[in-house]
Image (cartoon, rainbow, N blue to C red):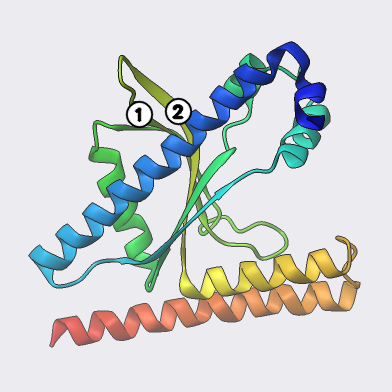
């Protein structure tokens, strides 16, 4: 009842909009499952280790829209907030990240709008990942819509670092001591070195 009161006359529009985001996640997760199975069948190897999905919560969406000074309406959400629906693809090797990107670029049911490469250009915190802002095709009963979503692709090492760093930020309420921040940056470098070494080992094995 509180949510209905918050959105007032727009409640049904917001509920419908959230359903579209849920459909987009379902569509993407299904497509990636098929891709994974196809690669396993044809090549005996898939770069996809596992896939995680998430939907932004209503409070986090409202905070983001207020921070961006956006009107709290469905049209503004749809046009300006592109990461309500999110999916994360985790790989074993760094090269696999770009192999998946190349595949996604060929699909006619996906439009890649923005590529943010935090692997080649890590964030100051040490965070590494490949972020894609996309629109995915969703087939409804009577029409087709393109729903915005965010896809993150990262290695197991990157994922472990990011998950751990997030927990520490939450514990310290985003005020991690400076010496710990330096250690986190160094840990990110070590994770990157591990990815580099494992990629080199893989390359040498494949040559033999």
What residue is disc 2 on? 147
Image-quadrant location for residue 12: top right
Q: What residue appears at the point 39 percent right and 43 percent down from the top-left corner?
A: 26
Residue at mark 1 to residue at mark 2: CA–CA distance: 7 Å
Question: Looking at the figure, which quarter contains the N terminus?
Answer: top right
Query: Is 29 placed above or below 145 here?
Result: below
Residue that lies at the very extreme toward the left in this rendered image: 42
Report the residue at 37% width, 60% height from top: 97
Q: Can residue 69 be seen in this view?
A: no
Q: Residue furthest top?
A: 9
- Can you say whether 15 is above or below 27 in the image? above
| Disc with the residue nearer the chain's start (1 vs 2) | 1
Left or right: residue 57 compared with residue 206: right
Instruction: Determine whether label 1 and label 2 are within 8 Å by CB.
Output: yes
Measured as percent of width and height from the top left, residue 68 is found at 78, 28
* Callout 2: SS: strand
* Residue linked to disc 1: 138
Label 1: state its secondary structure: strand
């Amino acid at each position: 009842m509180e949510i209905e009161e918050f959105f007032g006359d727009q409640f049904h529009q917001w509920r419908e909009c959230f359903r579209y985001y849920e459909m987009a996640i379902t569509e993407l997760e299904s497509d990636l499952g098929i891709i994974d199975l196809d690669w396993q069948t044809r090549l005996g190897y898939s770069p996809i280790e596992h896939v995680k999905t998430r939907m932004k919560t209503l409070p986090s969406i409202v905070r983001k829209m207020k921070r961006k000074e956006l009107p709290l309406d469905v049209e503004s959400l749809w046009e300006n907030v592109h990461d309500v629906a999110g999916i994360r693809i985790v790989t074993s090797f760094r090269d696999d990240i770009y192999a998946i990107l190349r595949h996604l670029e060929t699909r006619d049911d996906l439009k890649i709008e923005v590529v943010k490469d935090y692997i080649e250009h890590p964030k100051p915190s040490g965070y590494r990942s490949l972020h894609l802002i996309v629109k995915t095709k969703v087939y409804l009963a009577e029409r087709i819509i393109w729903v915005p979503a965010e896809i993150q692709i990262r290695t197991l090492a990157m994922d472990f670092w990011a998950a751990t760093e997030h927990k520490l930020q939450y514990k310290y309420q985003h005020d991690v001591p400076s010496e710990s921040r330096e250690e986190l940056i160094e840990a990110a470098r070590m994770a990157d070195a591990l990815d580099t070494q494992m990629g080199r080992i893989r390359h040498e094995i494949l040559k033999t």
